Image: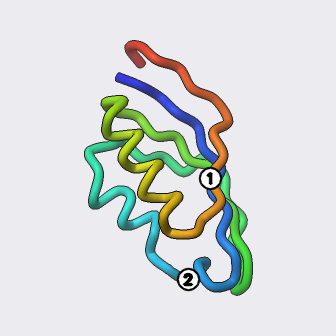
């Protein structure tokens, strides 16, 4: 299993979209929100993703296609 910490930033055109819901629904990952600050025109979320490295790569690639700003904060490969 792989563990990745991400910060995801959404501007006013994406803050109301259900991208966190889609992340948990569409990918075989454990998604844990550790911190967040969201209002009507801007938001950021710190999440921990845990799962197979291929699935984390697919999820991260998908997040980047949505126009969200995605930053990896920490990555640990191995048993979690």
Q: Which mark is residue 3?
A: none
Q: Is residue 26 above or below residue 4?
A: below
**Residue 38 percent location from the top left of the image:** 69, 72
Q: Secondary structure at mark 1?
A: strand
Judging by the rendered image, the residue that carries numbered circle 1 is 70
Indicate left or right for 76 with 23 as reference: right
Image quadrant for the N terminus? top left
Residue 75 found in image quarter: top right
Evaluate if marks 1 and 2 touch, with contact meaning CB atoms under 8 Å apart: no
Asked if 53 appears above or below 10 in the picture, the reply is above
Which mark is in front, 1 or 2?
1
| Residue at 41% across, 13% down | 78
Q: Quadrant of the C terminus?
A: top left
Relative to the observer, which residue lies in front, 36 or 53?
A: 53
Left or right position of 42 against 61: right
Q: How many marks?
A: 2
* Mark 1 / mark 2, whichever is N-terminal: 2
Q: Residue at x 67, y 36 (%)?
A: 73
Q: Position of residue 65 (x, y in %)?
A: 48, 64
Residue lying at 61% horizontally and 78% vertically, measured from the top left: 15
Number of residues whose C-alpha sits closer than 10 Å to that of mark 1, classed few (under 14), some (14–19) or many (20 or more) = some
Instruction: Classify 10 Å Cα crowding around label 2: few (below 14), some (14-19), many (20 and above).
Output: some
Which residue lies at the image location 47% right of the left edge and 48% below the top edge?
A: 60
Front residue (pair 32, 5):
5
Secondary structure at badge 2 equals loop
Question: Residue 16, labelled with which disc?
Answer: 2
Please determine whether, in this image, residue 66 is positioned above or below residue 29.
below
Counting from the top left corner in percent of width and height, residue 70 is at 62, 53
Position of residue 66 measured from the top left corner of the image (x, y, whole percent): 50, 69
């Amino acid at each position: 299993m792989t563990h990745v910490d991400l910060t995801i930033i959404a501007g006013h055109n994406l803050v109301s979209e259900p991208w966190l819901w889609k992340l948990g629904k569409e990918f075989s990952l454990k998604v844990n929100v550790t911190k967040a600050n969201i209002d009507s025109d801007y938001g950021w979320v710190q999440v921990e993703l845990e799962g197979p490295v291929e699935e984390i790569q697919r999820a991260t690639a998908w997040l980047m296609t949505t126009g969200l700003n995605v930053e990896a904060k920490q990555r640990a490969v191995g048993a979690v």
